[in-house]
Amino acid sequence: MKQTFLIIISLLCINVSQCQRPQKIAYIDMEYILENVPEYLEAQNTLNNKIAKWRSKLDRQARHIEILKTDLANEKIILTKDLIKEKEEEITLKQQELRRLESLYFGPKGDLFLIRKQLVKPIQDQVFNAVQSISKRKKYDFVFDKSSDLIVLHSNKKYDISQLVLQSINRARSIKSKKELKKKKKEAPKKELTDKQKESIKIREKAKNKKIAIAEDRKKLIAKRREELIRRRNEKRRILKEKKEAIRKKKEELKRKKELERSIKNKKEVPKKEIPKKEVPKKEVPKKEVPKKEVPKKEVPKKEVPKKELTDKQKEPVKTREKVKDKKATAAEDRKKLIAKRREELIRRRNEKRRILKEKKEAIRKKKEELKRKKELERAKKNNN
């Protein structure tokens, strides 16, 4: 129970500390930003031109309707009822067409709304993205628009980030313009060079070639010096090896001599005592002599088989078989070498991949540790405040 109670109290304390954290607020002046963006001004000018055209068209139609109305009022006494009805119907139709055009141009889903969306929306998106990036970088909790319907009675200029937004938009535009210029340069047809330009290009190429030649000579000298140093080092190593080998042989000879001397000293002639043997008289048993039958051995004459010499036709397939065997042996050796090379390459690639993965993991781990340290420092600062 005590542990749970302590955990609840600690969680409440953490929530209270987070709530007491000071919130960062900023504001922007959208009108000021849009006025300083040249793309918005161009879009606004195109919109104004289209609005002026539409207004002039609507005004012409409205004047035409007024003329028709005045004509009808003047000629009402002369005209019959049917003609008056026809003219009134014509005026109503023209009025309906005027209203339809007004709604088509200036309605909630009219051409003005759609064109404004097409022209102004990308600029507003740029402003929105810039505000988002600045708020993430500066860690703002709220960003208000001063020029909107929100009533702002007082605002401190140090919380105004309109200039920062403009700078970020201009930076993005400059990067985009540089990329477009590069593309245009690549796509643009090459102009014919003058004699002076050709001469200057030739001089530059000569200077480049000279630099390249000097660099190559320097590389060759360095390579020669390196080879000389390697040769000297190998020569020194060889001499040292020979000296060590001579010393080792001398030591071995000395050891052998010492061992021989020791063996000669240890080998002394010890006289053997002669023990007299007792002479035991042997009983003489008479042996019966059995006559042996002599069996005559048959001598079998060995047949000498003469070796046949191979003809030229028999020798040729033997030679071809030997050649085929040699080819197979060489092919098998080449295959073994290829397999060994491939295995070494695979092992090298696998080790390289493992090394790269280890480095990436190490970098990620270090970044995480740095972030943790930063967060801990920030928390410590906040707690101290």
Image (cartoon, rainbow, N blue to C red):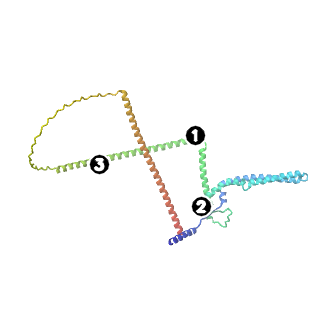
Above-or-below relation of 29 to 75: below
| Residue receiving disc 3 | 244
Specify whether residue 72 is in view.
Answer: yes
Look at the numbered disc 2 and give the secondary structure of its residue. helix
Q: Quadrant of the C terminus?
A: bottom right
| Horizontal side of residue 266 vs 355, given as left or right | left
Residue type pointed to by label 1: Asp
Residue found at x 45% / y 47%: 346
Q: Are marks 3 and 2 in contact (CB under 8 Å)?
A: no
Residue 246 percent across, percent down from the top left: 27, 47
Farthest right residue in view: 78
Camera-side residue: 331 or 210? 331
Mark drawn on residue 324 = none
Q: Residues within 10 Å of mark 1 (few under 14, many from 20)?
A: few
83 over 331 or under it: above or below: below
Task: Give the secondary structure at mark 3.
Answer: helix
Image depth: mark 1 or mark 2 in front: 2
Which amino acid type is shown beneath numbered disc 3? Answer: Lys
Secondary structure beneath dot 1 equals helix
Q: Earlier in the sequence, mark 3 or mark 1?
A: 1
- In terms of image quadrants, where is residue 37? bottom right
Viewer-closest of 371 and 242: 371
| Residue that numbered label 2 is attached to | 135
Disc 1 and disc 2: Cα gap in Å? Answer: 56 Å
Residue at the disc numbered 1: 195
Q: Choose mark 3 or mark 1, whichever is in front.
A: 3
Residue depicted at x 48% and y 56%? 361
Identified at 61% across, 65% down, the residue is 25
Sequence order check, earlier mark of 1 and 2: 2
Q: Amino acid at mark 2?
A: Ser
Instruction: State yes or no: discs 1 and 2 in contact (Cβ < 8 Å).
Output: no
Distance, label 3 to label 2, CA atoms, is: 75 Å
